[in-house]
Image (cartoon, grey):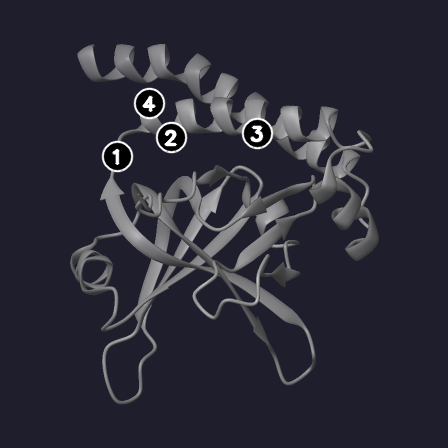
Amino acid sequence: MSQAPTRELAQRVFASEFNDATYTFKESDDERAPLYALLPTGARANRVFIVGTLTEKSDVGEDSEYWQGRIVDPTGTFFVYAGQYQPEAAAFLREAEPPAYVAIVGKPRTYETDESDVNVSVRPESITEVDVGTRDRWVVETAERTIERIEAFEDDANEYATMAREEYDLPVENYQQNLLSALESVEESEEDEPEETAETTA
């Protein structure tokens, strides 16, 4: 009995690392084989789960609607693009009023510019508005997943880490610094909350 294809687990990744994931690959010659982005910390990503602040949106389409969203996390900026093939995500961006916290599941996409730079973006499968608590939990959990990848990076049995060492000249310590800064930003926002509450109830 043939098994139904299962959806790939969505990787949690900060913007600083995601934007460096410029190398993509397939693991078979089947034209329907999934396309993976290679994360510099040594993991493959066919889908990603990101949470951040939607700070800007714009319709960049020429002949039809094609929405660009700018999503900021504590380490940098994600760009998402949704058009006629992502109608629900496109409708969300059309109606959204930045700034707003959003959670997005989508697929990594790369695009080579005329200057031969590679830009990395997300093609969203779903976009949901969330609260600050969800954003903060995502930061903590994404930091944990990133630490796990960094700790496994020097393992010779880790084929994706080996591939990352070959494809990227990027010290993983950079991402450790990024995640520590991200965690600090969450701690600072939590410390500020009681004061804000006090002001609103005074």
- Say left or right for 14 vs 87: right
User: Marks 2/1: CA distance?
Assistant: 7 Å
- Alpha-carbon distance for marks 2 and 3? 11 Å
Q: Amino acid at mark 1?
A: Val
* Residue lying at 78% horizontally and 54% vertically, measured from the top left: 168
Q: Which mark is residue 182?
A: 3
Kind of residue sitting beneath label 4: Gly
Q: Which residue is mark 2?
A: 135
Residue that label 4 marks: 133
Quick check: marks 4 and 2 in contact, CB under 8 Å?
A: yes
Q: Residue furthest front?
A: 1
Instruction: Looking at the image, tell me whether mark 2 or mark 1 is earlier in sequence order.
Output: 1
Q: Earlier in the sequence, mark 2 or mark 3?
A: 2
Could you tell whether 38 is left or right of 56 in the image? right
> Is residue 9 shown left or right of residue 54?
right
Q: Residue at x 56, y 27 (%)?
A: 145
For the residues labelled 2 and 1, say whether their Cβ atoms are less than 8 Å apart.
yes
